[in-house]
Amino acid sequence: MVSAGAIWLFIYNRNFGLANDLVNLVGLDKQNWLGTPQWAMTALIIMTVWKQASYYMIFFLAGLQSLPGDVLEAGKLDGAGGWRSTLYLTLPLLRNTILFVLVTALAAAFQTYDQIAALTKDGGPNNSTNLLLFNARIDFSNGDYDRANAQSVLLVITLLLLALIAYWLAEGRHKDVN
């Protein structure tokens, strides 16, 4: 993530960055992507999605390759077109893959530290890119162990609750389908 952050520092550079070149093509003014509170988190999210999308696509590719061909063929014979086949056959069959990617991506999002440190050094302008784990590491570095531990426990509980909700929603939908 640190190397990706270094690349994106050049892309977001106010003077010669690719992001501002693209904005100029549309006719808008140059932006200080990492220096303004309203753009810093958006810039961080764009970089993270760019970095992680290919990783999650591997899971979706594996899930798509493992779909039973006979079910998809039966749907085609029953008259299911492209969208209907996707909505009523492919997506329900990919339910476990979607659940896995969702929980993994949520856990990774809450553990964001490297991107923030690489792009904004100290949490960005007005601490606009500070997240829970980033704050916990800062507090730990400053010797505020009680606060850092409390934030870490809060992070684990939040992730556990989100994973349980995602699992509960996936299982509830599974029971409705059967």
Image (spheres, rainbow, N blue to C red):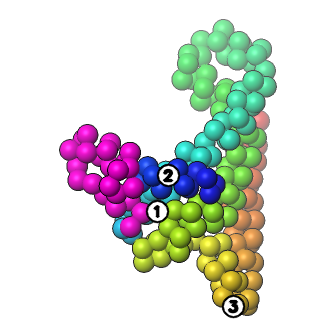
The residue mark sitting in front, 2 or 1, is 2
In terms of secondary structure, what is the magenta stretch mainly? loop
Q: Which residue is the extreme one toward the front? A: 16
Q: Position of residue 76 (x, y in %)?
A: 64, 12
* Magenta part of the chain: 13-35
Give the CA distance from mark 3 to mark 1: 26 Å
| Residue marked by disc 1 | 41
| Residue marked by disc 2 | 8
- Is residue 97 toward the left or the right of residue 48 in the image? right
Give the CA distance from mark 3 to mark 2: 32 Å
Sequence-wise, the earlier of marks 2 and 1 is 2
Q: Which residue is pictured at 58% across the width and 51% down the height?
A: 4
Q: Which residue is pictured at 65% across the width and 72% down the height?
A: 133
Of residues 150 and 163, the one drawn nearer to the viewer in this rendering: 150
Sequence-wise, the earlier of marks 3 and 2 is 2
- Give SS at disc 1: helix
Q: Which residue is pictured at 73% across the width and 77% down the height?
A: 152
Amino acid type, residue under disc 2 in the picture? Trp
Q: Residues within 10 Å of mark 2 (few under 14, many from 20)?
A: many
